[in-house]
Image: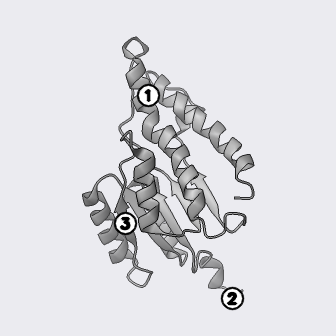
Amino acid sequence: MSPTDKFQKLANKHVLIIGGTSGIGFGVAEAVLSSGGSVTVSSQRQSSIDSALARLQASYPNAPKPRGFTADLSSPAVEQNLEKLFEQVGKVDHIVYTAGDKLAITPIQDITYEKIIAAGQVRSFAAMLAVKVGCRYLTNPKSVECSIVLTAGVVADKPRENWSAVATFSAGLLGMTRNLALDLKPV
């Protein structure tokens, strides 16, 4: 391996970042491009995708051209929306899930069943369905060369006032990820 090869660890690899147009997801997209990989980002809004793609292309003009597709993860049709996303994207080597929505910060006295379900839609339920659908699109699902990464917030370990609904799903995502590691090994 030449000295420059060690920085091209994702050469010829395709990474899908669900929630890749801002924050951590956008940072991951930048890291993929700077490591020689190709990237596809997804967001609920086309305007967010267009902005992210323009910034990525401007910052990495010699990298493979990034792509982007919309996917509504807040809809009851989330599984069908993810199916459509993966059909558009095609085969990937890595899936990174950083999608989020407006945090459901609510005092316990104002929590309702509907608010609890809404708090988990994007941050938990859609994440599990993204793994379910995405497994079929990994280039080699039985290889350690493929991966699925799920992200959660620190509230799982560091409680904050009025964040009980969010913490429920943040901590749950950590447990789900550990269990998925068994279900999907070696991915």
Q: Nearer the viewer, residue 156 or 137?
A: 137
Q: What quarter of the picture does the C terminus occupy?
A: bottom right
Q: Secondary structure at mark 1?
A: helix
Tell me the residue at 55%/60% (across/down): 95
Mark 1 burial class by Cα count in 10 Å: few <14, some 14-19, many 20+: some
Residue 60 spot, x, y in % from top left: 40, 78
Evaluate whether residue 21 shows in this view. Answer: no
Mark 3 burial class by Cα count in 10 Å: few <14, some 14-19, many 20+: many
- Whether label 1 touches label 3, CB < 8 Å: no
Tell me the residue at 57%/80% (across/down): 12
Residue 168 spot, x, y in % from top left: 54, 28
Mark 2 burial class by Cα count in 10 Å: few <14, some 14-19, many 20+: few
Read off the residue under disc 3.
68
> Eyeballing the image, is 182 above or below 20?
above
Residue 10 lies in what quarter of the image? bottom right
Q: Nearer the viewer, residue 129 or 99?
A: 129
> Eyeballing the image, is 42 above or below 113?
below
The answer to whether 155 appears left or right of 64 in the picture is right
Read off the residue under disc 1.
117
Q: CA distance from mark 3 to mark 2?
A: 32 Å
